[in-house]
Image (cartoon, grey):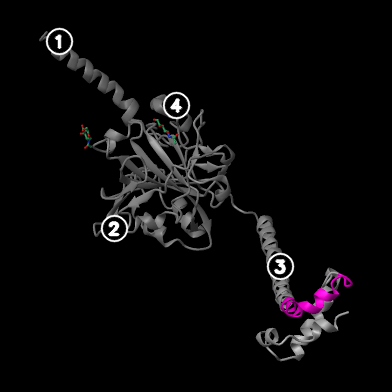
Amino acid sequence: MDSFGPFILLILMFFQWTAAPTAGEVTWTYSGLVGQSEWSEYFPECGGTSQSPVDVTTTKTRYNPDLKAVTPLGYSQHGNRPFSLHNNGHTVVIELPEWMGLRGLPWLFTAVQLHLHWGSGGPSHGGSEHTINGQSADAELHVVHYNSELYPNMSAAMTQRDGLAVLGILIVTGEETNPGFDNILNYLSRIRHADQKAFIPAFDVQSLLPKDLGRYYRYNGSLTTPPCYQSVIWTLFRERVQISKAQLLKMETILYSSKSDEPDRMLLQDNYRTTQPLNHRVVFTSFSAESGKELSSGEVTAIVVGVMCGCVGLAVIIRFIVKTIRFFKLLHLETVVVNSSTSSWDVLHNNRPAPMPRLKEPEKEKEKKQDVALNSTSAAEKKEEPSPSPQSEP
Ligand SMILES: *[C@@H]1O[C@H](CO)[C@@H](O)[C@H](O)[C@H]1NC(C)=O
Ligand SMILES: *[C@@H]1O[C@H](CO)[C@@H](O)[C@H](O)[C@H]1NC(C)=O
């Protein structure tokens, strides 16, 4: 038995030695020698059936009312310690302090890092990893967390189902500068080359997120880079954040994927993976189709017109009601008057038509109105001393 010990050790060492170059040492890229289509040759999980990113076809999503808003924990309590900014040759990474986390998932998750994905052609040329109905955004932010309730650290969690939770934030360009993103973009020139690191002032990480954290897409997926572990609970927010075109240009053109000692400088661009097949997975939404539907300008016009018509209609109805009330008040007055002279009515009852036929009511109302207008006497007085008007009726 003793002679087996070293033998087994030797076998283990041999496997480690052969395994190392395929898994750890291979430098993968987005295009080129070990490009996206080759990833799975070196990282088998990249060829799995629950890969990310995906295209979200909104008509095929399923509403899940149990999905509550995700709550970032401590994102705004950045403290005084600077953040580390790192160009790893694939993206820019900021390590996050361990007191930052995420609530609102079945477990508590602890923040690890955030990073970005972008394109190369300015606005409307792709750049995001996830797409919505086939439409790319200009860039995408990922905030990575590990399941700290079930696992002791990131490396233990990243290979496990439900081990990671990533927030995906789609970025589009607009007119205004987003000050939150300047906390990163203004320092990219310090880490232009791969493997460079810099410390930057800590900042409010929540300022990078959209306001609406209640509406999102949720599905089970993977890391979008090798080794593509299928361990990620994805939360892709419906609301997109905006940065300026100048900010996007900084993101797309400052960094190199090549190291400082490499003779050929390679811009770090188009660091996004193409969308992967859903393979029977369902993308759930935390919002129902109605509340999530964006209104077209035609629908907005229809609603405005509808509301205006409604208001006019309401005004007409109110006017009618007020008129009717006024009329019945007057009618009441007359009834009182009529009752007080019952004796003569009784006597004449058989010869006379039914009192106050419907057709004549409007006329009576008019008369009565005039009476009221002319006689400044109050209704109360009128009740006490009946006016002679009923007798003047035909
Ligand atoms: C992570 O946790 C595992 C399991 O407890 C441990 O073996 C490993 O050393 C830890 N890794 C780091 C980087 O702390
Ligand atoms: C993810 O997979 C787990 C099983 O591991 C399942 O319980 C859960 O409902 C799935 N979530 C989504 C959003 O599909």
- Image mark for residue 254: none
Confirm or reject: label 1 Cβ below 8 Å from ligand 1.
no
Give the residue number, with chain letter if any, for mark 1.
4
Residue furthest toward the left? 2
Q: Amino acid at mark 2?
A: Gln
Residue under the image location 58 percent in, 48 percent down: 290
Asked if disc 4 and disc 1 are in contact, CB closer than 8 Å, the reply is no
Residue 197 lies, in percent from the top left, at 30, 50
Residue lying at 71% horizontally and 64% vertically, measured from the top left: 309
Q: Nearer the viewer, residue 79 or 115?
A: 79
Q: Is residue 338 magenta?
A: yes
Cβ–Cβ under 8 Å for marks 3 and 1: no
Residue at position x 29%, y 26% from top?
20
**Disc 4 C-beta below 8 A from ligand 2:** no
Question: Alpha-carbon distance for marks 2 and 3?
Answer: 56 Å
Q: Depth check: 26 or 2 in front?
A: 2
Q: Is residue 384 above or below residue 1?
A: below
Q: Nearer the viewer, mark 2 or mark 1?
A: 2
Q: Quadrant of the C terminus?
A: bottom right
Residue at mark 2: 77
Q: Residue at x 46, y 58 (%)?
A: 247
- Magenta segment, which residues? 334-353
The picture quadrant where one finds residue 296 is: bottom right
Q: Amino acid at mark 4?
A: Gly
Relative to 354, is 305 on the left or the right? left
Q: Which mark is residue 47?
A: 4
Question: Does residue 207 lie above or below 293 as drawn?
Answer: below
> Is residue 247 within the magenta segment?
no
Nearer the observer, 125 or 294? 294
What amino acid does circle 3 point to?
Answer: Ile
